Amino acid sequence: MSIMVPSKTPALITSGRQALDSALHQLDQAAEQLGLDDGLRTMLATPRRSLTVSVPVRREDGRLDVVQGFRVQHNVSRGPAKGGLRFHPGTDIHEVTALAMWMTWKCALVGIPYGGAKGGVAVDPAGLTTRELERMTRRYINEILPLIGPEKDIPAPDVGTDEQTMAWIMDTYSVNTGYSVPGVVTGKPMTLGGSLGRTGATSRGVQIAALAALGRSPEGVTVAVQGFGKVGALAAQYLADAGCKVVAVSDVTGAVYAGGGLDVAGLRAWVAESGGVRGFRHADAMAQDELFELDVDVLVPAALEGAITEANAHRIRARLIVEGANGPTTPEADEILAAGGTMVVPDILANAGGVIVSYLEWVQNMQAYSWSSGEVELKLRDLMLNAFTEATSLAAERGLTLRQAAHVIGVGRVAEAHQMRGLYP
Ligand code: GLU
């Protein structure tokens, strides 16, 4: 039985099945390039562990609701499973599986010693009070407790979760263990062992990837950002700080445009106050769909899966797309964009900054020692740029898109780990 928790989020339909089909298609293409045999392909196409749980939530008025929760460990051949936890009404087991698979390739591509995982709860967090949210988070974690741990599977923030969620998870796990275990989650508050630079890490990575892909001075480069949440808002800020002109952004409330460049800091303050970009006085209102059709240099999809499809890919005029979100472009759209000469820096590369700094946070936790923000930033930049160079070189060498090349590298490393380890028993 699944009881719907009241939702304030407009119907952002993210078909989990479509996301999984996309992920499987990308894996298939990479497996073909790598010449992997059928058995190994099936290993890589299927998650090693997949858990669905029913989470009872006591509401403030005494009612009992039950929501569905998931944790999928797609692969653990290169290290502990790693990946975010999503609270969104549209999430399902297929979506979480796709996202877990992308985490596996992402960690392998940027060379950090993790497998891939993802968690999700099919709930709209905006429809719960803070206390309801805390109870639900703790109960969900309790249900998946046997799966997680600093050496096993390490959750982190994703859509609809934040450092407060991670603090509750760290506490729930630690209370069950009997001592504090900061390394069980990343993206924690600083007081609980969080890392400097983690909050903006995904966005910083998007900025690094965008500037590397541009290959020219960012001065005056025009940018549109779809999604003005945790990733999109700071990506817009960092790109503006670097000299780009962010002319348009959108979120679930609407879209705003300013040809001369938006005051991104002012817009972030407006969003903090009003809850969305709509109504920002220093810009023109625009339909959300129009954002994709703008004549800009760079488009940053930073919301959910399936934003760029065969229905709108033809109309995209940006020459460069940098994917802040996971899975924003469908394979059909990818083909249209490639045929039209649009360069796409794929999710597993462009948004890897988050998990890179998660890794740095975990390393600091494991050695009980913290680094300066400069050290973190330097390591993030190094890992991002190494992966970018490797992917662009392979793409040029084999005539692949950047997504195909990134997958060949990621999938290839995981396949190699499987081959070296062999099969037990
Ligand atoms: N949720 C982020 C992602 O999709 C971060 C995951 C992590 O830090 O483990 O990459």
Image: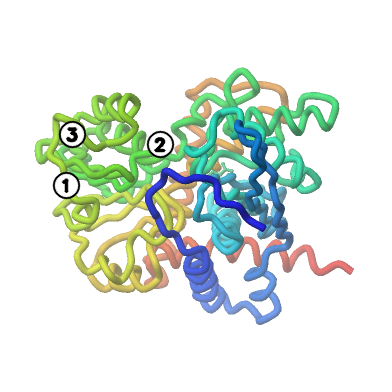
User: Which amino acid, mark 1?
Assistant: Met
Question: Picture quarter containing residue 151?
Answer: top right
Label 1: element kind: strand
Nearer the observer: mark 3 or 2; the answer is 3
Q: Residues within 10 Å of mark 2 (few under 14, many from 20)?
A: many
The residue identified by callout 3 is: 262
Most distant residue in the left direction: 260
- Locate residue 328, reporting x and y percent: 39, 58
Give the answer, above or below, for where 378 lies relative to 387: above
The residue identified by callout 2 is: 204
User: Which amino acid, mark 3?
Assistant: Leu
Nearest the camera: 103 or 370? 103
Label 3: element kind: loop
Q: Residues within 10 Å of mark 1 (few under 14, many from 20)?
A: some
The residue identified by callout 1 is: 286
Residue 35, which numbered label? Answer: none
User: Which amino acid, mark 2?
Assistant: Arg
Disc nearer the start of the sequence (3/2): 2
Q: Is residue 360 left or right of residue 324?
A: right
Q: Quadrant of ligand 1?
A: top right
- Residue at 52 percent of width and 68 percent of height: 17
Question: Picture quarter containing residue 62?
Answer: top right
Q: Is residue 272 left or right of residue 216?
A: right
